Amino acid sequence: MSTDRRLYPSTLHPPDLSADDDAGAEENLPWFLLELKAYVAKRDNATTAFSRTWDALMPAEIHVEPRILAAEDDLAVLAITVGPQKDVDKNLDCYVYQVDDDGSGRPSLTHIPRPPRPYFFGANDTGVLRYRTDDEHTAGRREYIVAALYRAPWGLPAGQFDLCLSDSKRGYWKLSKRRRHGGRNFYHKNCKVVAIGGDAGTMAFVDLWWGIIFCDVLRVEGPLLRYVAVPEPMQNNKTLDDDARLYRDIAVVGDRLKYVELQLHWKACAHFSKSYFSDGWMASDTEIMDSTDVKVHGKLVPKVWRDQGMALSPFRDLDACQPVLGLQEDADIVYFTTKLNRWDADAWVVAVDMRKRELLGVDAFAAQRYVGINFYVHARISKHLMNPETARDVMLSRFANNKQV
């Protein structure tokens, strides 16, 4: 396998904060959209945390963009590969970024062991849950647990899974078997992990096309997994086998699971046979809304042009995908990614109020570091960051080899 990997040049140049960012930073942000790939730069601020790599590895030996695997409450799980390029596939490590965990006013960055083979860290399979202890010595202390659910190796009956847990109290991985009764011919492929919480520490491992596996990670004595099917795909999506995150999203908002689906409209091209172009979309959360129903203010439309000089609509002519739910409890806002085509380096994030059927805003997004789509996730860590003026800056700026530098 080739390991000839390089950081994208833009990874070494984090974007500067704009005037709008400065104005928004004065507010208490209850949540934000968090880019999945971090930047590599020396830019210290109140969100900077320090940790150690292995003794033989230098922080400069980063050949793959650090990635966000999971984010929940005041925590984020980061995957970082540090080491020689020839060993880039072997040196993947994870760190838990935690906001002010010890009262010092500074965030921490804690290395967690690698999971037992053949398991690995993947954003689709990994989640993190914050909980409070109830034992007599540490009652009320805030701890966390990193959980990953994997299908059991081939050859075992369908419906069997391996649950890997790493607790902040113990610092090592614990492996347990999980089985779903009636698992014959059962298919499940994780798309994302959602922390539910409660006394049992329930986590939801979501296949956005098929259903949700609910698993208690604080009470591991029970062998059963609970399963709930998600709504059937919209008509035009029933034959799709793409990454479900391009069309669907789910999140905990208030005391319920909220869900959205995007269905694209395609129109045959008059000049080329078997060719189609984007002709709008339809979205569904609590009700169905067509893109033609959205009120659009001309000043918000991105200034993108065809070769012929014709202006593009943000909905009818651009490729829209990756709906991401806003986490406001009193609104139904969905964020979409739009591009001229799915492989473009330039993209726009479009915010739509599903209740008012109105375009709220459009913001440019530099997508050259991504193949296809899947750029960001919603996260609530912003409300815990101590210095709101830097809430949208890079959380991780550097590593130390054997000591802080």
Image (cartoon, rainbow, N blue to C red):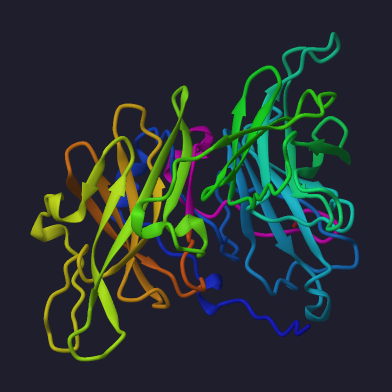
In the picture shown, does residue 279 fall above or below 216? below
Residue 14 painted magenta? no
Question: Residue 260 location in percent, x, y?
Answer: 38, 44
**Residue at the image point whose x is 73% and y is 41% from the top:** 183
Residue 400 painted magenta? yes
Q: Is residue 104 visible?
A: no
Would you say the magenta stretch is mainly helix, strand or loop?
Answer: loop
Total labels drawn: 0
Asked if residue 234 lies left or right of residue 88, the reply is left
Question: Residue 21 location in percent, x, y?
Answer: 34, 50
Asked if residue 53 lies left or right of residue 332, the reply is right
For the residue pair 384 and 124, the one nearer the viewer reads as 124
Q: Is residue 352 visible?
A: yes
Question: Residue 291 location in percent, x, y?
Answer: 20, 55
For the residue pair 202 and 158, the one nearer the viewer reads as 158
Asked if residue 34 lies left or right of residue 315, the reply is right
Q: Which residues are magenta?
A: 376-404
